[in-house]
């Protein structure tokens, strides 16, 4: 896995917001196979993004000295995997979510042994996990038909599979972050909505859009 483009990437920073958050994109490194990504499906009864496939993460708390500290804390809380098992690989560009709040994505590498030894999903947050292959990011496509109610333009989606069976779609902000990650690794540029218009359009705040 060539992570040099990620290390060389200079992330674009957006203005912080009162409820800034961070997510961790974890690459699971395997000895005899390509890396996979760790995604979790949120509980169906949650107020925000219920039943959606997401990257582990959450809001920065007062005790978090930085968004990176926030990302590691949230990752450990949601997956049960200690932060010291991972190695930080880099940072991606900032995004705004559908409520106009800043989201900063980080990328880490995690040995498969750590996943096997420690993965215990936080029951109040997630119901299951998926491990799509890194190469599956080639399948990210624009949601031109509007299958999901995203206010992002353009909006993207990625269908994820396990043993040939569809487990649903990644969409909204998470799909945009994964597309940006793919672009960084491949040296390409895709039109991606980082969400600036959400900051200006109060009418969609609280809509549940991603």
Image (tube, rainbow, N blue to C red):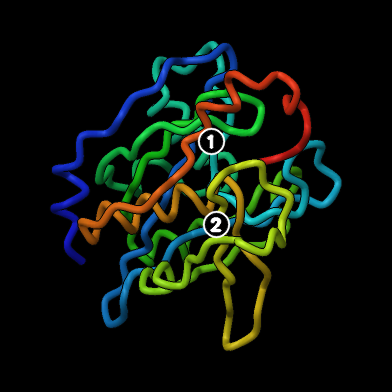
Front tag of 2 and 1 = 2
Disc 2: CA contacts within 10 A as few (<14), some (14-19) or many (>=20): many
Height in image: 137 above or below 201? below
Disc 1: CA contacts within 10 A as few (<14), some (14-19) or many (>=20): many
Q: Nearer the viewer, residue 27 or 199?
A: 199
Residue at 26 percent of width and 52 percent of height: 184
Whichever of callouts 2 and 1 sits on the residue coming sooner in the sequence is 1
Q: Quarter holding the N terminus?
A: bottom left
Residue at 17 percent of width and 62 percent of height: 2
Q: Nearer the viewer, residue 122 or 40?
A: 40
How many numbered dots are placed on residues in this image?
2
Q: Which mark is residue 74?
A: 1
Q: Which residue is mark 2?
A: 156
Mark 2 and mark 1 residues within 8 Å of each other at the beta carbon: no
Q: Nearer the viewer, residue 102 or 107?
A: 102
Q: Nearer the viewer, residue 107 or 174?
A: 174
Q: Quarter holding the C terminus?
A: top right
Location of residue 203 in the rendering, given as x and y in whole percent from the top left corner: 75, 23
Location of residue 206 in the rendering, given as x and y in whole percent from the top left corner: 77, 27
Residue at 73 percent of width and 28 percent of height: 204
Residue at 60 percent of width and 27 percent of height: 198
């Amino acid at each position: 896995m060539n992570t040099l483009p990620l290390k060389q990437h200079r992330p674009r920073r957006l203005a912080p917001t009162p409820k800034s958050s961070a997510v961790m994109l974890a690459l699971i490194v395997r000895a005899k196979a390509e890396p996979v990504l760790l995604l979790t499906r949120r509980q169906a009864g949650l107020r925000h993004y219920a039943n959606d496939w997401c990257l582990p993460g959450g809001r920065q708390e007062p005790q978090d000295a930085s968004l990176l500290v926030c990302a590691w804390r949230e990752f450990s809380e949601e997956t049960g995997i200690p932060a010291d098992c991972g190695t930080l690989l880099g940072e991606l560009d900032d995004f705004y979510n559908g409520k106009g709040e800043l989201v900063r994505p980080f990328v880490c590498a995690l040995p498969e042994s750590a996943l096997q030894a420690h993965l215990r999903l936080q029951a109040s947050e997630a119901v299951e996990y998926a491990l799509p292959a890194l190469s599956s990011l080639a399948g990210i496509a624009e949601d031109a038909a509007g299958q999901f109610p995203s206010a992002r333009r353009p909006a993207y989606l990625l269908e994820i599979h396990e043993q040939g069976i569809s487990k649903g779609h990644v969409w909204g902000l998470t799909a945009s972050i994964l597309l940006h990650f793919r672009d960084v690794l491949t040296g390409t540029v895709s039109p991606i909505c980082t969400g600036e218009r959400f900051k200006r359009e109060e009418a969609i705040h609280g809509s549940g859009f991603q």
